[in-house]
Amino acid sequence: MNRGVLEQALDAMPAAVAVLDGTGSETYSNRLWHDLTRDESFHDFLGRAGASIVQGVNDGMQAVRSGMLPVFEQAYPVYLGTEARWFELKATAAAGFKDGLLLIHTDITERRLEQERLRASETNYREIFDKANDGVFIHDIRTGRMLDANFKLYEMYGYTAEEFKSIMVGAISADRPPYTQSDALKWIRKAARDEPQLFEWLAKDRNGRLFWVEVNLKRARIAGQERLLAIVRDITERKRAEDEVLRARRALSLGSHISTLGEVGASLAHELNQPLAAIMTNAQAALRMLACRGAEPTELREILGDIAADDERAAGMVRRMREPLSSKASDTQRLELNGLVEDMRLLLKADTLAAGAALDLYLAPDLPALRGDRIQLQQVVMNLVVNATEAARAMPPGQRRVTILTRREDGRSLRLQVEDSGLGLTQGELECIFEPFWTTKPNGLGLGLSISRTLVEAHGGRIFAENRPEGGARFVVVLPTEETADGEPAAWTRGDR
Ligand SMILES: Nc1ncnc2c1ncn2[C@@H]1O[C@H](COP(=O)(O)OP(=O)(O)O)[C@@H](O)[C@H]1O
Ligand SMILES: [Mg+2]
């Protein structure tokens, strides 16, 4: 190959090339070398990198010259004006020159920047990964093995990221169907094959404690690899709240209670029709009799007797309907009034919140206990709060308030108060709201207050309503304390109303 072609090739190379002779002067350099050094000598050019670099490079080149090192490599920044560019120098012995050196200089500035960016984004990613509020596992998409785990998972499960790598998912699961290792792998396979999966999982921490998590499995490309991400959220608290509301709802069987009452009301109306129709027929017959042929006392007495009997039948039906509520002072136990209200807090909150109303509880500490049926008294609180919430709806959202208060009434009794920020009660309403079937609501049954009164009186207490001076209504329930109630068995027999 002739020298011209060789030089042409060297000039086309993306590296700067030079040959130094034994004295250190350049005997050859390609085009890029000239561009790079701006026609300075290599010594001057290197000088821009700083004294310690110069020293290091000189020592390295000496080592190559003396045959101690086959290649010397070094990267350094060179300051060209205000800009620093990074170079990598490679020096080898130049064949055919005594003590000659072949120098190859490559500009690695871009490469270094890229590496720095990568390192920075790696650090960023790690930071986000570890600061996440949810636990994040990275799984091998084929084997399901855990490759990485963030700090949140350490808090949740008690294993370090390193330890996670050596255990399988079975070890951090309840490990009984459907929460076993193989169940987990099924989910993983499904997410790897189809779309992302979202499911609840019974997990186990390092101490064997079980807790509920929600897992979101989805594919992701991480550092160029197909992975499976498992985003894990502790839902123990949510589960507990859900259970609490469910339990409370079931206990009060609010929905079913109301619909049962509705049904009872409907069938009662149906049954009442019969005696009412009979009374009407008999009354009309009596009227006709009087009008046409003058009164026949025996016949009239018979008809009036029938009317009285039918009326008695109707009254009996109404009585029977109310009986199951009143005669059942059933499940009597020692109760803390505050505890009883506290246990309903979530349920009540859910109901007031749905109406956009704020609920405040002011529970006086150290109240004496009372005796009664927990469910029945909770039913009373529920009825009053439902009414209060409905009343508060008359106001704009920011002004809807419901307040529950407990305190001592006197030495013998406790007071429970439910207040609202609604429109309050008219004089007429104050007189009849406790009557059964009295309602001002289009879909109201008019039974809530009547039932509440029956229940409160069955506990030897009383209930009344008043208007608050600041506006809105106040319903007051006064119940005897345990000691008082014990001494007065009469309190348990319902007043005859
Ligand atoms: N907090 C209250 N503020 C204003 N009116 C009330 C309140 N609570 C009850 N009432 C009145 O008493 C009536 C009867 O209440 P209730 O017996 O619970 O039956 P319902 O709620 O089905 O109407 C209601 O329709 C309403 O007119
Ligand atoms: Mg009501």
Image: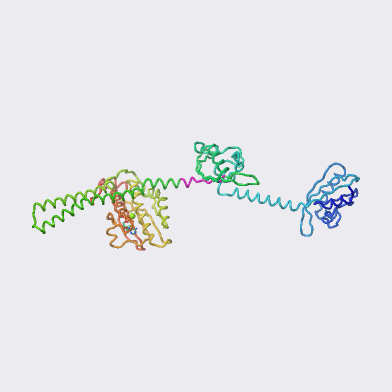
Judged from the image, the quadrant occupied by ligand 2 is: bottom left
- Residue at 74%, 53% (x, y): give it: 110
Relative to 80, is 210 on the left or the right?
Answer: left
User: Left or right of 121: which side holds 101?
Assistant: right
Figure label count: 0
Q: Nearer the viewer, residue 378 or 214?
A: 214
Colour scheme employed for the rendering of this structure? rainbow
Which quadrant of the structure image shows residue 45? bottom right
Q: Nearer the viewer, residue 430 or 203?
A: 203
Residue 233 on the magenta segment: yes
Nearer to us in this view, 268 or 194: 194
Relative horizontal placement of residue 454, taking residue 393 as reference (left or right)? left
Q: Position of residue 47 (x, y in %)?
A: 83, 54
Q: Position of residue 393 (x, y in %)?
A: 39, 60
Horizontally, residue 313 falls left or right of residue 61, namely left
Q: Is residue 228 above or below residue 442?
A: above
Using the image as rendered, state which of residue 360 and residue 300 is in the foreground.
300
* Segment colored magenta: 230-239
Q: Position of residue 101 (x, y in %)?
A: 87, 47
Q: Is residue 220 magenta?
A: no
* Residue 132, x across and y down, in percent: 57, 49
